[in-house]
Image: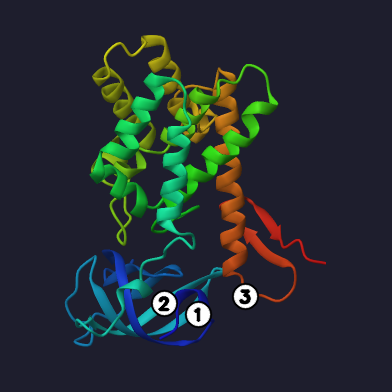
């Protein structure tokens, strides 16, 4: 079997893949076909079933399927044209080949997150972080396994924890370099800014938007979570709760990027740039990792609206 990242134009594709998405559509001539998204641990690829013959057996979204197909370059992107398809049988595949996973040790990352929580001096903030990130075992387990995105940066198992920890460490490094930064408040925002993604995205390997993800989004979900949890803590100052919620609300930085409010505190603007930096640089890493072309240029990347070059010379 060839992994998705290894596929080249006109390759014969024979192997097992996770059917992440299935849609039945019609051509302009009224002919039914399937549009699919297939996944393995190296990525996701569009696939089409143009001929619904007896060689295309019954299957559903979320199934592991075995395909006989051809890889084709279409409008600059790799795509798979499927000739034969059936459900995979138990024992025919190793599930770890189909779930992209962080390269870092999840338990070590979570230990670092707990250490950051324990370093917080403000008792109200520390209690809030403990209740959300540590004492709720289901939420802690989800944090360790969730991705941080459907298709962009950190879109793999453990990606959410990796991203949250990275942003918190950037904020920890930067906060002492500027006046008017409250370290405890900034860490609260860094550790909670994307916590709503646990409920915005379904668990791996499907990693699709939930109903709440589609209708509310992780910013609103995260703010609601913070509101509920601060109300459970006796005497939690209203102004402090508002400052924390503002960090979550404004971390995308701009209205066009989904922030209901622009950052209006020093902590909020620092959090926004730390979040944006980690997301952008991880996107660069992932594009370069997947690149198989010769030379320093990776090519034009729509997600970043620019050509990307490796810094080798």
Q: Report helix, strand or loop for mark 2.
A: strand
Residue 209 point in image, percent of width and height? 31, 48
On residue 66, which mark appears? Answer: none
Residue 312 point in image, percent of width and height? 78, 65
Q: CA distance from mark 3 to mark 2?
A: 18 Å
Quarter occupied by residue 84: bottom left
- Left or right: residue 25 versus residue 172 is left
Q: Quadrant of the C terminus?
A: bottom right
- Which residue is at 31% across, 53% downward? 208
Q: Which residue is mark 1?
A: 7
Q: Report helix, strand or loop for mark 1.
A: loop
Relative depth, front residue between 157 and 63: 157
Query: Answer yes or no: do the residues labelled 2 and 1 have beta carbons within 8 Å?
Result: yes
Query: Answer yes or no: do the residues labelled 3 and 2 have beta carbons within 8 Å?
Result: no
Rendered view: 106 above or below 188: below
Q: Which residue is mark 2?
A: 80
Q: Which residue is mark 3?
A: 292
């Amino acid at each position: 079997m060839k992994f998705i990242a290894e596929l080249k134009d006109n390759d014969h594709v024979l192997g097992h893949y996770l059917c992440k998405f299935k849609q039945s559509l019609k051509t302009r001539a009224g002919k039914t076909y399937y549009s699919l998204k297939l996944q393995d641990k190296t990525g996701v690829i569009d696939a089409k079933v143009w001929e619904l013959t007896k060689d295309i057996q019954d299957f559903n979204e979320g199934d592991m399927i075995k395909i006989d197909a051809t890889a084709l370059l279409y409008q600059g992107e790799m795509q798979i044209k499927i000739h034969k398809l059936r459900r995979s049988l138990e024992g025919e595949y190793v599930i770890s080949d189909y779930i992209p996973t962080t390269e870092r040790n999840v338990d070590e990352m979570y230990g670092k997150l707990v250490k950051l929580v324990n370093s917080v001096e403000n008792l109200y903030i520390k209690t809030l972080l403990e209740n959300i990130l540590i004492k709720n075992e289901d939420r802690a387990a989800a944090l360790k396994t969730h991705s941080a995105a459907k298709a962009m940066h950190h879109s793999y198992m453990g990606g959410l924890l990796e991203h949250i920890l990275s942003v918190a460490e950037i904020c920890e490094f930067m906060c002492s370099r500027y006046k008017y930064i409250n370290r405890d408040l900034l860490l609260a925002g860094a550790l909670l800014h994307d916590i709503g993604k646990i409920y915005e995205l379904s668990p791996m390997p499907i990693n699709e938007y939930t109903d709440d993800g589609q209708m509310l989004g992780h910013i609103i979900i995260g703010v609601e979570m913070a509101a509920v949890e601060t109300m459970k803590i006796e005497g939690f100052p209203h102004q402090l709760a508002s400052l924390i919620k503002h960090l979550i609300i404004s971390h995308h930085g701009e209205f066009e990027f989904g922030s209901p409010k622009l950052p209006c505190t020093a902590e909020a603007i620092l959090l926004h740039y730390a979040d944006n930096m980690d997301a952008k640089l991880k996107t660069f890493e992932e594009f370069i990792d997947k690149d198989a072309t010769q030379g320093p240029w990776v090519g034009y990347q729509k997600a970043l609206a620019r050509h990307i070059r490796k810094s080798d010379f």
